Image (cartoon, rainbow, N blue to C red):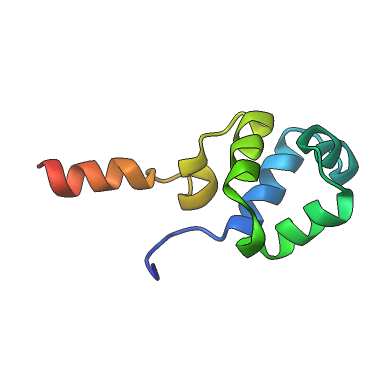
Amino acid sequence: MKDVPLNLKNTLRSLRVKLGYTQAEAANLLGITPPTLRSWEKDSTAIKWTNVERIEAVYHTPRDYIFFGEEVSFSERAKKTYVS
């Protein structure tokens, strides 16, 4: 996993800011408290899968981007590696 090109906490924050949401607004849309969102933006290790799905829906962003970055999604990299 060392070659994964993304730190999730930066993406969560940058997506929120890009969409123009405050932490309070985004937390409300996600059905969580602002302190929970702050904690996710600092350390994403405690995010449950159901919350990842909500993040994907609210931020209108595929989970591959959220987890693996914008260069090339993880699934696309895997296809190129194993299908070629």
Disc tally is 0
Residue lying at the far bottom of the rendered structure: 2
Residue 5 position in % (x across, y down): 44, 59
Q: Residue at x 76, y 42 (%)?
A: 17
Q: Residue at x 66, y 33 (%)?
A: 59
Q: Looking at the image, which is closer to me, 63 or 49?
A: 49
Residue 58 position in % (x across, y down): 69, 31
Q: Looking at the image, which is closer to me, 50 or 18?
A: 50
**Residue 42: which quarter of the image?**
bottom right
Residue 57 position in % (x across, y down): 63, 29
* Horizontal relation, residue 4 to residue 62: left or right: left
Residue lying at the far left of the rendered structure: 84
* Horizontal relation, residue 63 to residue 77: left or right: right
Q: Looking at the image, which is closer to me, 18 or 35?
A: 35
Q: Residue at x 37, y 66 (%)?
A: 3
Q: Is residue 62 above or below residue 66?
A: above
* Horizontal relation, residue 55 to residue 69: left or right: right
* Horizontal relation, residue 28 to residue 44: left or right: right
Q: Residue at x 65, y 39 (%)?
A: 55
